Image (cartoon, grey):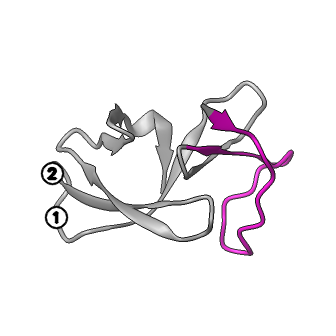
Amino acid sequence: MTNQTTFNFGGETPCESFATKRDFHGYAQFRESEAGPWRFYVSGFDSTTTGAAGQCAVLLTGGNTEWVPIDENDRITIAGRKYGRERWDH
């Protein structure tokens, strides 16, 4: 299901001290510690206000971004599943 590999995204990408990154259905995921949760990286939001449903740009493993839904509870939808704020970073 997931492919753990090393990516080279360039200088503006979040970096952990031990560089843990993986490909999750084409989306890049990072974690800050070996036991920490995997997190998606959200690079931007549409013009909707906090507390309203909208769209956000999530980093793909190839370095591009893809717009995905974000609901009024700050949950993003990736591969048909919702992920709360504890599973993504901005």
Q: Which mark is residue 48?
A: 1
Residue at 75% x, 34% y is 33
Q: Regarding mark 2 in the picture, which secondary structure is present there?
A: loop
Give the mark, 1 or 2, whose residue is nearer the N terminus: 1
Compute the Cα span from label 1 to label 2: 7 Å
Answer with left or right where residue 43 lies relative to residue 31: left
Residue placed farthest to the top in the image? 35
Whether the magenta-drawn stretch holds residue 16 is answered as yes
Residue at 52% x, 61% y is 59
Whether the magenta-drawn stretch holds residue 8 is answered as yes
Q: Regarding mark 1 in the picture, which secondary structure is present there?
A: loop
The amino acid on which the numbered mark 1 sits, given as a three-letter code, is Thr
Per the rendered image, the range of residues in magenta is 2-24
Residue at 53% x, 71% y is 64
Badge 2 is on which residue?
53
| Label 2 neighbour load within 10 Å: few <14, some 14-19, many 20+ | some
